[in-house]
Image (spheres, rainbow, N blue to C red):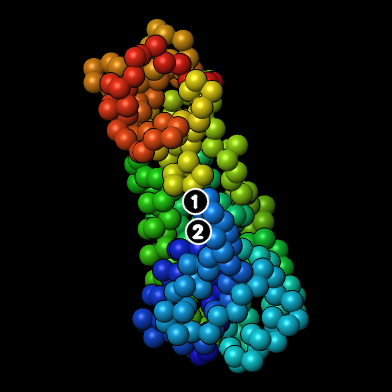
Amino acid sequence: MRVIFAGTPQNAATTLIALTKSGVDVVGVLTRTDAPIGRKKVLTPSPVAAAAAELNIPVLKANQVDEATLEEILALKPDLGVVVAYGAFLNEGTLTALPKGWINLHYSLLPALRGAAPVQHALLQGLTSTGVTAFQLDRGMDTGPILLQAPTTIEPNESAGRLLSRLTDIGISVLLEIIPAIAAGVTTAKPQENSAASFAPKIDRVDAQISWTKTAVDIEQLIRAMNPEPMAWTTLQAESFRVLEARAWPAIVLADPVARVQLVDGKVLVKASSGSVELITVQPAGKNVMAAIDWFRGTKGHLVFGS
């Protein structure tokens, strides 16, 4: 069965490489156009485009599938489209153009956490489990009938980056099971329970700002969810201060005001509205990532974050 693969970021590139190495006949790749990267805004191919080039797979670059792009897709004579984080909706004409349609890989157990950021929202909500869903694409946002799901437990202290890496591996296994089943015509699609749907909208930098007036547990969940992008941050002396890793200590109640930083029993602690947050890895403005204890020892103390 001939497959066209649509995707853009690194986890999609990892999936593309794994599918081709496992013998899936990927005849073409659809990805978004080159984007400006870094301070110099250098136009750079997406990770999927770069992977496809290494694999000698034809690459189509488009931020939406118009008639011209669809003609290019059809010229490759694909039977099935596989989508992993492409980053754009497919119109009705595109969805119905391939003999086997299009399937999408989503990093949650649908109908939970529909939307652009299911991994981050799973951590923000303090969920203890999540998973991967392969489903038939339709015109809605992650609303199509479910083909296959694979659950997993969210590990303690797991960041969004680590969780996405594990879900990527699980998703590869799901695709390697469902693609042959589609080719053989032995799949069963189960409609989603729309009444049970929840949503995971795109995360912006403003969403990553730490509010020290929240509980220590809430703050730890935010920090884990925002690592590696866009990274949790607060302010210190009017400058941005990133927190990459932290741990909640609900039972440690400091007498100091909220957002005050102090060293207690070898821990760099910040008072929250309930409990305390231990800073483990940080990045002050204009400096490299460092252990919080090293940063604190290099300061003069009397530190209060913006709350």
Residue ID at (34%, 14%): 300
Residue 169, position as x, y percentages in the image:
38, 65
Tell me if mark 2 has few (under 14), some (14-19) or many (20+) residues whose alpha carbon lies within 10 angstroms of its own. many
Quarter in which the C terminus is drawn: top right
Residue 9 can be seen in this image: yes
Tell me if mark 1 has few (under 14), some (14-19) or many (20+) residues whose alpha carbon lies within 10 angstroms of its own. many
Badge 1 is on which residue?
119
The answer to whether 231 is drawn above or below residue 141 in the figure is above
The answer to whether 25 is drawn above or below residue 221 in the figure is below
- Seen from the viewer's position, the closer of residues 85 and 215 is 85
- The amino acid type, in three-letter code, at marker 2 is Tyr
Label placed on residue 107? 2
Q: Specify whether 121 is left or right of 11.
A: right
Label placed on residue 99? none
- The amino acid type, in three-letter code, at marker 1 is Val
Residue ID at (32%, 27%): 295
Q: Specify whether 135 is left or right of 150.
A: right
